[in-house]
Amino acid sequence: MNIERIINVANGEAEADLVLCNAEVFNVFTKEMIHADVAIVDGIIAGVGQYSDRRAKEVVDLKGAFLVPGFINAHCHVESSMVVPEIYCQEELRHGVTTLITDPHEIANVLGLDGILYMLRASENVPVNYFVQLPSCVPATCFEHAGATLEAEDLLTLKNYPRVLGLGEMMNYPGVLSTDQLVIKKLEAFQDRIIDGHAPGLTGRNLQAYASSGICTDHESSTSSEALEKLRAGIAVLVRQGSASRNLKTIISGVLEAQVDTRNLAFCTDDKHLSDIRREGTIRQNLKMAVELGLDALTALQIATWNAAKIYKLSNIGAVAPGYKADLVILKNLSDFNISAVYKDGCLMVKEGQLLHQIPNSFAGGAICNTVNLPTVEESDLMLPDWDCLPVIRIHAGEITTSKEWVKKADVSDRIADGYLRKVVVLERHHATGNIGVGLMAGYGLNHGAVATTVAHDSHNLIVVGDNDKDILFAMQVIQSMKGGYCIVKDGKEIGSLPLRVGGLMSDVPTEEFLLALDDMLKKAADLGVSSGIDPFITLSFIALPVIPSIRLTDCGMFDVDHFCMFENDSEKER
Amino acid sequence: MNIERIINVANGEAEADLVLCNAEVFNVFTKEMIHADVAIVDGIIAGVGQYSDRRAKEVVDLKGAFLVPGFINAHCHVESSMVVPEIYCQEELRHGVTTLITDPHEIANVLGLDGILYMLRASENVPVNYFVQLPSCVPATCFEHAGATLEAEDLLTLKNYPRVLGLGEMMNYPGVLSTDQLVIKKLEAFQDRIIDGHAPGLTGRNLQAYASSGICTDHESSTSSEALEKLRAGIAVLVRQGSASRNLKTIISGVLEAQVDTRNLAFCTDDKHLSDIRREGTIRQNLKMAVELGLDALTALQIATWNAAKIYKLSNIGAVAPGYKADLVILKNLSDFNISAVYKDGCLMVKEGQLLHQIPNSFAGGAICNTVNLPTVEESDLMLPDWDCLPVIRIHAGEITTSKEWVKKADVSDRIADGYLRKVVVLERHHATGNIGVGLMAGYGLNHGAVATTVAHDSHNLIVVGDNDKDILFAMQVIQSMKGGYCIVKDGKEIGSLPLRVGGLMSDVPTEEFLLALDDMLKKAADLGVSSGIDPFITLSFIALPVIPSIRLTDCGMFDVDHFCMFENDSEKER
């Protein structure tokens, strides 16, 4: 940053690279719209005021359009989009997001520090300010085997890496409350940084204890009283509107009703799929919904921009003001927040929804594309536990929580034959340890064949569901040969496959191509009888996550979330 | 900070050091008063909520009193109080200030880095969070000789010293606007830190240029439009209410009228004398006045606390919330903000205006108490310039600006004899260089004798005013022998003296003793005929400051502020 040149342009004495004239400029500091020009040089805003009479390489007359700071997505998981950072950022940028804060928790579960480093490197040249919070909970629990384990010492090696802000969401809130030594070490290591929280439903003294440890954000509020209590505890509330978790309406309504200060609110998506982003954007959608609920547009814009920058102590981001990055969005209105153009570092990147410059793809290769390591598995490995009575994972349309059912071992064959039950297998897929869990699932549908995925929160082992062992084994072979992704097989034939070669989680093909391939897979799964209302892959990807009620399957076996322990023989009688 | 213990206390599972029960707790985040208890351990707030039923070493029932965060004085010069940091902090603390941000600009002009280090060390154990901004303009101008010169490289040696936040007020705004290389180097060195501004009256593109350089605060607004323009440029406005400069009424009225967001406002004093602080406090007075002007009390409290913490990116300060420092003020009401008690780090420090614990004085010694180094001066050195016509510094009651008059050389003796003129001398006092400026002053009064001070903004040379050369020379001897301070002499006798042995700027005697001695000096000066409405010492201390209109005297000679150059022979004819 050449301060001299910026000063000279601001002064009106040197030529600007670009002057955006005649705009209604949103001032985040005073919460006003002010008619002005904006002079830009070297990607930095030099001045806001009267610049239309000054020299500039380029002058754009905005004809009174709204000029606002680029939006900030305060918390997202890029991997959840199933595309690499370069492609993800294209989609965010198209919808006005110029800054994002992401926790590469998923790839860290696959490859540890190397996975985080891949994300940092892949995002080095993207036209989005891409900040990283280091994953605090890898693996998520001790009832499964992830590809890596990250302790405080590991995280410290990346603490001072450029663009690393702090510690990612501390999901292990029981560990915080019980002062688990490994958790405390991580918190201690990041006391001078931003520590994100993840504490659904935490309240009262437990919430105070959680906040007292230095955790200062949370994106898990699902009721307005929860959001208000967190705000009052000094925790910034990141208002989430993702693909699955949609809390914006509840929180914004609660904030409006309580009439509290909004400055410790920011917007985020957490997990949002690429198709949803493509359709409606991320923060743009949060803005639109918030205003529909009655929040005034200027307050909503503060939440979408400067608030997040202040919460994360980001300098020079989130405002249209001298010295700030020229990350700008031109809006058509303040109701649906449709976007005419997006500037990043003073460069016009998006016009009427079209990306004007291709973002260079760093082309992933090496270890990051070689993360599926399966052992030899035989039919004898797919045997159900030899218990009289077996627990069943009952899934429901439109939900990721499951409920518990029981079936007598003697009845299993019949219930698979009549289509009510399917066998589900979780196989450790990082180090070919042979760890395998075998269980039963109801509600999935699937007439015949097997469906498999290497996206499986949070350890991202291989999950296969099927009505017969041969197809389950064949699906494993298909997954191994394409090094991760989704597949559908039937009678030893590959019906469809979607490679996710980057970590077994992400694709690096262009958005359109990826979305077409994904649609094709969804259609094939439906054709094969996967129940309507069940996403054949996303629902499956949560089957192994042992922190969501009520019953899960990990590579260690069937897990009882309600009692937070593995099922054993006779579990049924005790519970 | 022992996170485990704090978590356990917050949880209600371990014994708190202190529980403050039954309070109306101000929540800075939501801007609400909430009835609650506050549990404290190790000087940290563990939890806010229901703690009266928990174990605690001490429980205090606040009986519904208001409990608010300790106040933050966002910009002050400790030296201007004329007492050392230990004593200054006592007075701030008595009035509820638990955090201050100070620019040791005065002592830096005397002793450079050693002066700054003295202030840092002296404040190491004070019960106030004492943060330092490194002085950016030493010396203030090139038309005088200070005790030291500080360049970017010098400042960088202290950048990472604990409690150093950033770069102090960049008074050299012409240097910023003209991209003076030495100024640019300093700005570049602190781009990743908070840079304070000082830009009275700057507006339009010049203000944009100033802000574009990374400067992000200013405390010099004297009109509401100036304050609003600075806010809109992204510059935090520090609302000043000091002894001389009193801008609060104007700024707060303007903000109320414009109805803009208040979150980029903080309160400060800049320069406030010990006697004023003793009488009315600092930020407490700002609060009281703001509320009298119609600002709602809770917004005023945000400005006095969390706002400043956010502007300066201070963590764990400025809120009553878990994990924050237990720096707390108990208020009797929300109108005059009278204080019942002040807690610092969870320890009761002030009760009903009484300081309960003496603050240890680090007892200054060595170089810091040996800063007056005068050369041998004789009557022949006190000759006025041999010009036909001489400029006169005309001072006015209640103002620090001066106006220009002219007197014929031939008339000088008569006008001194009739009491209209007095001779004024500025002698470089740091390195005995012998640099001396001799001039004339009108409006000071003083029947007979001489008055001297080593407090002389910003270079802090020795200023002596008198009606005869013998007394002027004798005053110099008195100052030398007591190593700095104020003195009054007449006919070769010492009428009164107030030693300021620390840097020639500060006293280290207790407040009461100091204030009595100062009163005595003021009385003696009045007895000697110093004009009423003129502070005999403070007015004198601004006579050598070449940035305040219209005419000054430095150790280089008479200075024309309006034309920003030294007077020369024939200056009168040209102007």
Image: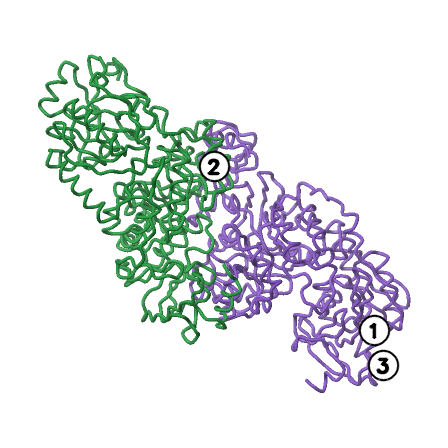
Chain colours: A green, B purple
Pair 2/1: label in front: 2
Q: Nearer the viewer, residue B154 or B131?
A: B154
Residues under labels 1 and 3: Cα distance? 15 Å
Amino acid under label 1? Asn
The reply to whether residue B204 is in sight is: no
Mark 2 element type: helix
Instruction: List the residue tagged with mark 3.
Output: B413
Q: Which quarter of the rendered picture does the N terminus of chain B lie within? A: top right
Is A314 above or below relative to A14? Answer: above
Label 3 – label 2 distance at C-alpha: 73 Å
Q: Are marks 3 and 2 on the same chain?
A: no
Q: Relative to residue B405, is residue A543 depicted above or below?
A: above
Image quadrant in which the C terminus of chain B is located: bottom right
> Which chain is disc 1 placed on?
B
In the image, residue B22 sits, relative to residue A12, either above or below, namely above
Q: Quadrant of residue A48?
A: bottom left
Left or right: residue B198 compared with residue A45: right
Q: CA distance from mark 2 to mark 1?
A: 65 Å
Observer-nearest of A374 and A54: A374
Q: Quadrant of residue A531?
A: top left
Q: Secondary structure at mark 3?
A: helix
Q: Is residue A194 left or right of residue B424?
A: left
Residue occupied by mark 2:
A212
Determine the secondary structure under disc 1: loop
| Comparing labels 1 and 3, the label whose residue is closer to the camera | 3
Please tell me how crowded label 3 is: few (under 14), some (14-19), or many (20+) other residues with Cα within 10 Å. few
Location of mark 1 (residue): B447
Local crowd at mark 2 within 10 Å, few (<14), some, or many (≥20)?
A: many
Counting from the top left corner in percent of width and height, residue B499 is at: 80, 56
